[in-house]
Amino acid sequence: MVKKYRLGQPFDTEAVVKQIESLPFEDIPFEKETKDNFTSISFELGKDDLIFGLGETVRGINKRGWIYESWCSDETTHSEDKRSLYGAHNFIVVRGKTTFGLFVDYPGRVKWDLGYTSISNAVISIEDCNADFYYITGDSERDIVKQFRAIIGKSYIPPFWAFGYQQSCWGYATEKDFIDVRDNHRNNNLPLDCIYMDIDYMDNFKDFTVNTNNFPDFKGFVDDMKSHNIHLIPIIDAGVKKEKGYSVYEEGHEKGYFCKNDDGTDFECGVWPGVVGMPDFFNKDAQRWFGRQYKFLTDMGIDGFWNDMNEPALFYSKKGLDNAIEKLKNIDTEKVNIWEFFNMKIVISELPNNLDDYASFYHNVKGKMVCHKDVHNLYGTFMTNSAGDFFEEEFGKEKILMFSRASYIGMHRKSGIWFGDNFSWWSHILLNLKMLPAVNMCGFLYCGADLGGFANNCTRDLVLRWLQLGVFTPLMRNHRALGSRAQEAYNFENTEDFADVLAVRYRLIPYIYNTFRRCSDENDMMFRPLAFDYPEDKLAVETEDQLMLGDECMIAPIYEQNKNGRYVYLPEDMTFVKLSGENVCTENMTKGIHYVDVALNEVPLFIKSGKQIPLCKSALSTAELDTENLEYIG
Ligand code: GLC
């Protein structure tokens, strides 16, 4: 049962697609407080109550005991002291005396104090008096999630080939770079379906341009790659470079399609291309206009995109930079003491993603100026929807691959997400796993992390272990930062181990794809905490390094270095399966704790007794997969 409680006159976030009658906020079954510009709801937490959800966040599957803030952030260190990452996923399910779901439909900052200030209290607050609150009860956590997902609409389904393996690196710049990646995969028996084009493919980081020195015949190149069953997937950043003669900028500026300062001039800030105008995706004309720019690339055969820097990430605002330089200019270098030195550092470190900047620019919402900070969490979503609308109009559904870094619930109908700039850290394999059910709860099914880690230097074993989790995530992309250690599979010794793991992904594609489609159709979760499936089993409830996958499987990847296996808890009898290349090794196991050995070229999987899953033969691309002739294991 879903009940909607309305406070004031909420901004239309477009998150909920189902019409639901509004009840007065006063009737919401929580303690509540509303002051001039502040609203909070709170409820008691029993000793053993659990809280699930919040999508893309740090820490555990059970979110209790920390304070989170929904505020889409260009957050480069996903350490456990952080409160926000790139997405604003305002949905939780609380298991307590009554089990309920809660969606706070509000596009500004939401604070979730989930037993942080007081372990026995949850307090959720916003600095506003306008929001919709959805309260959902049901038979189980999974049922509550399904009811929630039914009101926010069906999840995006990408093309079939988007379930293949994908290679990315910030730094591939020329045709030769891409051809090398392709050939090195093909020549080493490593399957591959997509290669990503990071900002380096553009002309001076300008959206909807291509560097013609590096790609003299871009369309021909895209076609040629397709003839090898490789899709090229370019990045699109939110900011549009301010440059005379650059038609996208000039048109956007002339038509008033960029965000504005309070005096009506364009708000300007610095991102990768230097000074940019920020498209005002809240203005429907501007939103449509930006979406149609993707045509420049789709006309050349491109059929996949990743949207980035759309929290939006601001390295500096023009105003902020001018002020900072003024402050630094006035420093007398002869008199700098240690405190002044630290102050100087702060002047620069406070420039990126500054809250004063977010409070200083405006969107045109049906002719009314709305301050960015009040609707911040929708920016990336409205960017991505601009493209999604265009793709659906032009090509229909399921034709174009797209995922975004920033997101709000609602965007899940048009696009997937990736989990942003993680590190080549073992702990980030586990964080990747923990985020999966939480984002599924919010409708994001097509998702995945940068496998191998984005920042810092990876090791061979880390990449292999991470791929062994990635084998199950709908988006399976290896991506890394400029300057970090090469982590393409062919750059390591004994490439055959990588070929074995990637072959497993291709063998599993029929299962993963069909499970994905079913979860989209039935508003179900593809990955669930064990706590959802075995609510009475204390050990299962506390297990946070294993997940249920579909209705048949459990996954338990290895996420520590120098380990040849791990302990796994089986909440019921299961078949332990080790997959490696075309090899399948099975062993029946009884409910309980087991130590399982898993070599670096093996993928561990557990199948519930009485269930089976299909495997096809592996291939070097999805186009070559024979999905008709299946073998069943279990
Ligand atoms: C951002 C993205 C990252 C990308 C980089 C350069 O940090 O999150 O994936 O490689 O920008 O475009």
Image (tube, rainbow, N blue to C red):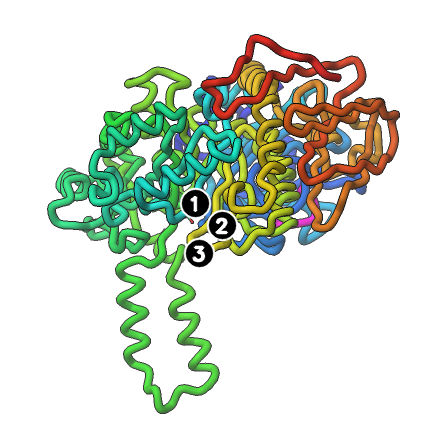
What element does badge 2 sit on? loop
Disc on res. 483 = 3
Q: Are marks 2 and 1 in contact (CB under 8 Å)?
A: yes
Respond yes or no on whether mark 3 lies under 8 Å from ligand 1.
no
| Image quarter (top left, top right, bottom left or bottom right) of the C terminus | top right
Q: Label 3, label 1: how many angstroms apart (C-alpha)?
A: 10 Å
Q: Residue at x 47, y 34 (%)?
A: 187
Along the horizontal axis of the image, is 161 left or right of 322?
right
Image position of 631 with respect to 166: above or below = above
Q: Residue 572, labelled with which disc?
A: none
Residue 169 is labelled as: 1
Could you tell me the amino acid type at mark 2? Ala
- Residue type at tag 1: Cys
Mark sitting earlier along the chain (3/1) = 1
Q: Position of residue 456 (x, y in %)?
A: 53, 56
- The residue that appears at 21% across and 45% down in the rendered structure is 213
Determine which residue is flagged by label 2: 486
